[in-house]
Image: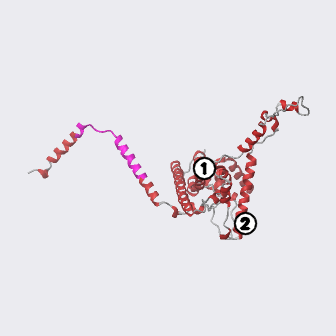
Amino acid sequence: MTTGSSNSEASDNTELPDELVCIFKSLASNDKIIFKSQQIDDPELMPAQKQEIAHNAFKRNRKNFLIRFGQYLNESQIDDFLAVGLQSSEAFQPTEDFDDMCLLLEDFRRKLQTRSICVKNRRYVAMRQLLDQGEYFSEHEMMQRAPELYDELVGQYMTEEEKKERDSYDVRSTTFSGILMHTLEQKQRDELLEQVREETAPQTSEPATTNPEFEVPAECRKQWGGFDNDEPVACSTSRATTMNSINNSAKPACYYPGERELLRHEFMSIMKERFISGDDKDFDYTAVDENALLDDLKQIEQDEEDAYFEASDNEEATESAKPVHSSEDSEDELEVYMRHLHNHHSLQH
């Protein structure tokens, strides 16, 4: 009996669409979901057990499955559930109302969009606080988080004096461990940038002499080893000139202060975008995304007012779209009302 039941469960799993299997696996990997009430000494459920619980809940009742797990689905999973989970060949149970499940999915989708906006607003407020504090968005810290981007937009256009001033460290106001950490970070950054330059440098498999510009003129080659006459032959110096120009071109030109400032602003803008998008790997975004104290109450109130007036405008537009009676019809109705009022018994003497 056990073997038969396990085989039936395996066959059920194979019949499931891949989209649903991915949903069950995603739910099983979510630590926020409580799949089963357990005692303190009970062993922790394995991912396969959690996946089986989600699968069984789906088979028993899809609407209850959404009520229990729907809030943990992302937008793509909501689309998959709508396209696959509700298009089953099995008949709906009495408690599985199709319209209700569609409304549940749309509600989850709307909450996800609201949540996304709320998270971005909180991160924006946190970013402003970090900007005021100065340390997280300082040049040194941003250079450590994105050394390649910093070197591309800022570092390579700095003079040696500016780099020395940037990398200087006040040894009087810190400990030995702080100085050691600063030195190690700078060494790691330099090694990373050197590795990137080597990887992006063009590979020249052919020798330089194959370039026509680098070839020695025929007159010079003819004279080497024995001259026909004593007249001096002036060999071309284009090779040395070309090599000097190549060496000079390897170093980027120093832009004007205004252009360098624009590149620095662009670097700062990119770093701000990275923070709001959640791309700073070493930053604890949970402390920001779940912090209701970062909500901008004025902005929330403004958004609610905008939504209210937008709804009012839609109602006015609907009213204006209704057919308008002609002036004659309006006058007739007014005359009827006035005549009725004039004939009212309270006005009779």
Q: Quadrant of residue 131?
A: bottom right
Q: Indicate left or right for 43 with 63 as reference.
A: right
**Quarter that holds the N terminus:** bottom right
Instruction: Judge whether residue 326 is colored magenta.
Output: yes
Instruction: Inspect the image, locate mark 2, and give the three-letter code of the amino acid beneath it.
Output: Leu
Q: Position of residue 342 (x, y in %)?
A: 14, 47
Q: Which residues are magenta?
A: 306-330
Q: Which residue is mark 2?
A: 180
- Relative horizontal placement of residue 181, taking residue 35 as reference (left or right): right
Does the magenta-highlighted stretch encompass residue 158? no
* Magenta span: chief secondary structure: helix
Q: Residue furthest right?
A: 226
| Residue for badge 1 | 260
Residue type at mark 1 is Arg
Q: Position of residue 312 (x, y in %)?
A: 38, 49
For this orientation, the residue located farthest to the top is: 228
Residue drawn 75% across the image and 39% down it: 241
What percent of the width, then of the height, locates residue 287? 59, 63
Does residue 52 appear anywhere in the picture?
no
Q: Give the camera-side residue of 210 and 39.
A: 210
Residue at screen point 71% across, 54% down: 5
Q: Position of 105 compared to 25: left or right? A: left
**Residue 188 place in picture, x, y as percent:** 73, 58
